[in-house]
Image (cartoon, rainbow, N blue to C red):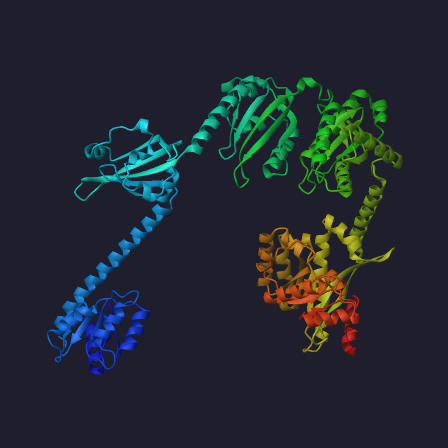
């Protein structure tokens, strides 16, 4: 034990400390009442030894003060001296002491007292633990949603919790002492069980009907347990009561629903299916199986019973459709496809379904139907592809979906084989028909193998003669449609081997994009035909979009993309640098690397014209890598020419595509390891919109980059959709205020107030602040007054070459 010993004589304190140590205890000693009281307030002692006589406050008064503390039950032993009288023992007890000891202290006597104190300390701890458990139990019973009632052997209510009372419309006080049958309707009252009968039950559970104070009844589930004393004699009953009104309603609704479902399944001509996603099991109705020529017991409950029978050319489309619905991107599942019949022939069907989701939106079940549409004239007899009628049906669905959800975009691509008549004339119609079959098969193969970048989901249909048409869904814009057309053109890159003949074919393509303006699917096909005629007039293997404005823009984009590829090979890219200046000292602190394109024909091209095209293609990855490496190389060379006092940072922008690359961190690591560049001088600028596309992924990448020693800058702050609640999660060093805020400083409104708030926020998060787009001395002065750290813009300098930076530094020209 850690014992507090209080005595004003130092030799006694020394004796007690040594003696207690020998007896296996630790002593805390002090020589006055005030110090002793402070120690008792600071910690709990299982035993306190007090000298009766002390200067100032004596042992009796100190004992009274200890008893007045919140935890004043500490065992106290008063130590007598020879001056005390026997009747003084009454004073000891009155002061609240537990025991006494005479002076001089006898070791054996002290040891007996300590043994008693130890036992009392254990009892006290056990009592407190039991009391705490009782308090927790009482709190749990008081706050539980279940009704809890305790009755004696005469069935009188000894205790009931608030939930029980509220459930029956009473207050707790009204129920105490009542017969527990007050909860049951009067007509159901029976003779109460005797203690012997209760003892024979021990515990029992039942459903019943209870009655409220106002006379209304409700269903309950009751669980009772017998309470016995230590001799096994029954002393009462504890009963828990749950209102199961909602459960009964749900059970009744479920029974009614199951009856309706059974009737619908028997009466429906369609096949029904019910997919338990977690179990990977599907219930197929008898009708579903009979539509494919099977008996009920011949098909199991695996999803493969369905998907393995789907035509190979349709399976990917079906799987994409149901995944899109499960992911929530499609409101329902609906897909037409071919399904293998028992007799070896494929039948055209429509599968429809709807997912059932939990409260978090996660699908756990999917139910639907299967409709046989084989006899409805929906497929082309020659190729087995959907025909024009079925294609119009699919196109109508796309139009209706676009009207409900305008952001959903789609289009049609109409193909016409170039010089097909020559094939028929020279090789015969049999070869021509086989070529049509081969073309349709390759087109389907392209759809099935489409990568996720294209996000292609389509239906290929043979319209008539040598024309095919493709419905492409979930496209972004006209440029996307052009790239899809290029992909489909690859179908004709390889020759077709037909009947021993090697046939080189090509196709002209007319493209029409869906819009709300279209009333009928036939109108969209008509415009695709108009575009097809224009494409054929331009020569073989061309494609044209119906909207001439979009067509012109798309062609220009393709030209820029082609020129960009040549620019990479022809070293046409340049890097310019815009200074970043301290607003307090006016000194140059860093440079931002900016990409420019020196086109051999059109001259200098600004990034706004070509970077969006590069972003849409894979070119941006190679361009970003080149900018990072070239800027670091040139900066390292520049730093070697500067004095040691001139320490400049280098800011390099990271695009969205570059940020999402798996090897970005490795790129930066390798660059720092093999170059003379110091990581602390490299500032990587990432826009807030790029990070917020996936905050968790963004935080992880930023953390890895931070470990390399580079500094991280949040670019264009205020123009994206970042959340302030996320901002502190990212390991950012610098915040760049977008130039639009700086430009609005002199206008009406709260521009300056917003800027000041941004600066204060950044500083609160230990971030430096850089303002972009400073053009006037007034803007610079205002930002400096707000506490902004750095600035860049035309007020200091336009983007210039590395040689111009060297010249200005050498001549020590001012940066303004």
Q: Nearer the viewer, residue 810 or 350?
A: 350
Q: In this picture, is 423 found above or below 95? A: above
Please identify the quarter of the rendering in which residue 690 is found.
Answer: bottom right
Q: Nearer the viewer, residue 752 or 121?
A: 752
Q: Position of residue 148 (x, y in %)?
A: 33, 41
Residue 21 visible in the snapshot: no
Q: Picture quarter containing residue 16?
A: bottom left
Where is residue 5, by image quadrant? bottom left
128 left or right, relative to 621: left
The quadrant the N terminus occupies is bottom left
Q: Give left or right: position of 207 versus 497.
A: left
Q: Quadrant of the C terminus?
A: bottom right
Q: How many numbered discs, if any?
A: 0
Name the spot of residue 291 as percent of width and height, x first.
Answer: 59, 18
Residue found at the far left of this picture: 86
Closer to us: 26 or 178 = 178
Task: Identify which residue is drawn at 74% across, 32% down.
Answer: 470
Left or right of 33 in this view: 425: right
Vertical order, 554 against 604 (above or below): above
Q: Residue furthest right?
A: 537
Does any portion of residue 623 appear in the rendered image? Answer: yes
Task: Provide residue 182's location: percent of width, then percent of height.
Answer: 31, 34
Residue 150 placement (x, y as % from top left): 28, 41
Q: Residue at x 80, y 53 (%)?
A: 609
Residue name at image x 31 percent, y 68 percent: 43
Q: Is residue 60 left or right of residue 674?
A: left
């Amino acid at each position: 034990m850690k014992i507090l010993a209080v005595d004003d004589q130092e030799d006694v304190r020394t004796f007690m400390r040594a003696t207690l140590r020998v007896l296996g205890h630790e002593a805390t000693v002090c020589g006055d009442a005030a110090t002793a009281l402070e120690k008792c307030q600071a910690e709990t002692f299982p035993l306190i030894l007090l000298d009766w006589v002390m200067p100032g406050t004596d042992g009796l008064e100190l004992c009274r003060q200890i008893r007045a503390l919140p935890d004043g039950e500490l065992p106290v032993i008063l130590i007598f001296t020879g001056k005390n009288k026997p009747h003084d023992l009454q004073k000891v007890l009155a002061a609240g002491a537990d025991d006494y000891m005479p002076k001089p202290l006898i070791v054996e006597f002290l040891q007996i007292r300590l043994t008693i104190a130890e036992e009392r300390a254990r009892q006290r701890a056990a009592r407190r633990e039991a009391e705490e458990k009782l308090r927790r139990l009482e709190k749990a019973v008081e706050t539980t949603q279940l009704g809890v009632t305790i009755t004696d052997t005469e069935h009188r209510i000894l205790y009931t919790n608030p939930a029980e009372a509220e459930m029956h419309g009473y207050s707790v006080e009204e129920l105490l002492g009542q017969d527990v049958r007050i909860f049951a309707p009067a007509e159901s009252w029976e003779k109460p069980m005797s203690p012997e009968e209760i003892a024979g039950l021990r515990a029992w559970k039942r459903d019943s009907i209870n009655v409220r104070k106002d006379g209304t009844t409700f269903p309950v589930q009751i669980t009772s347990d017998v309470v016995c004393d230590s001799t096994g004699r029954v002393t009462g009953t504890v009963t828990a009561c749950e209102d199961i009104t909602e459960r009964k309603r749900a059970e009744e609704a479920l029974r009614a629903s199951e009856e309706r479902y059974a009737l619908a399944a028997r009466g429906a001509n369609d096949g029904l299916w019910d997919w338990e996603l977690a179990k990977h099991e599907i219930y197929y109705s008898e009708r579903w199986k009979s539509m494919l020529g099977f008996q009920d017991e011949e098909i199991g409950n695996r999803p493969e019973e369905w998907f393995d029978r789907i035509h190979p050319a349709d399976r990917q489309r079906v799987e994409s459709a149901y995944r899109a619905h499960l992911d929530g991107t499609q409101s329902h599942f609906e897909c037409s496809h071919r399904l293998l019949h028992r007799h070896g022939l494929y039948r055209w069907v429509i599968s429809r379904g709807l997912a059932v989701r939990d409260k978090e939106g996660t699908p756990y079940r999917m139910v639907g139907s299967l409709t046989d549409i084989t006899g409805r004239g929906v497929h082309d007899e020659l190729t087995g592809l959907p025909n024009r009628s079925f294609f119009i049906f699919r196109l109508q669905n796309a139009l209706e979906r676009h009207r409900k959800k305008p952001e959903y975009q789609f289009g049609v691509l109409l193909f016409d084989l170039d010089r097909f008549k020559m094939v028929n004339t020279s090789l015969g119609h049999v070869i021509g028909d086989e070529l049509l079959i081969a073309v349709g098969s390759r087109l389907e193969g392209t759809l099935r193998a489409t990568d996720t970048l294209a996000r292609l989901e389509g239906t290929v249909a043979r319209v008539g003669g040598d024309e095919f048409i493709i419905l492409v869904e979930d496209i972004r814009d006209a440029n996307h449609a052009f790239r899809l057309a290029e992909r489909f053109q690859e179908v004709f890159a390889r020759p077709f081997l037909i009947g021993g003949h090697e046939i080189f074919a090509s196709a002209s393509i007319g493209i029409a994009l869906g819009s709300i303006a279209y009333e009928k699917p036939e109108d969209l096909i008509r415009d695709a035909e108009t575009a097809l005629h224009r494409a054929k007039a331009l020569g073989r293997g061309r494609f044209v979009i119906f909207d001439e404005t979009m067509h012109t823009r798309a062609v220009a984009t393709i030209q820029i993309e082609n020129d960009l590829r040549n620019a990479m090979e022809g070293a046409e890219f340049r890097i310019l640098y815009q200074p970043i200046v301290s607003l307090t000292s006016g000194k140059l602190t860093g440079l931002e690397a900016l990409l420019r394109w020196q086109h051999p024909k059109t001259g200098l091209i600004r990034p706004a014209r070509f970077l969006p095209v590069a972003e849409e293609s894979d070119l941006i990855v190679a361009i970003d890598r080149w900018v990072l490496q070239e800027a670091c190389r040139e900066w390292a060379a520049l730093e070697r020419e500067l004095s040691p006092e001139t320490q400049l940072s280098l800011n390099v922008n990271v695009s969205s595509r570059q940020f999402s690359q798996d090897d970005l961190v490795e790129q930066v690591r390798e660059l720092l390891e093999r170059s003379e560049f110091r990581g602390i001088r490299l500032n990587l600028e990432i826009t807030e919109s790029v990070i917020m596309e996936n905050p968790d992924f963004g935080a992880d990448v930023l953390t890895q980059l931070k470990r390399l020693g580079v500094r991280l800058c949040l670019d264009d702050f205020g123009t994206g959709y970042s959340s302030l609640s996320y901002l502190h999660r990212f390991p950012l060093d610098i915040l760049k205020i977008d130039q639009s805020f700086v430009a609005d400083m002199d206008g009406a409104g709260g521009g300056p107030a917003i800027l000041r708030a941004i600066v204060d926020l950044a500083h609160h998060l230990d971030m430096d602040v850089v303002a972009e787009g400073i053009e006037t001395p007034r803007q610079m002065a205002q930002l400096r007054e707000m506490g902004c750290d750095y600035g860049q813009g035309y007020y200091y300098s336009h983007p210039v070459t590395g040689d111009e930076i060297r010249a200005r530094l050498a001549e020590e020209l001012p940066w303004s």
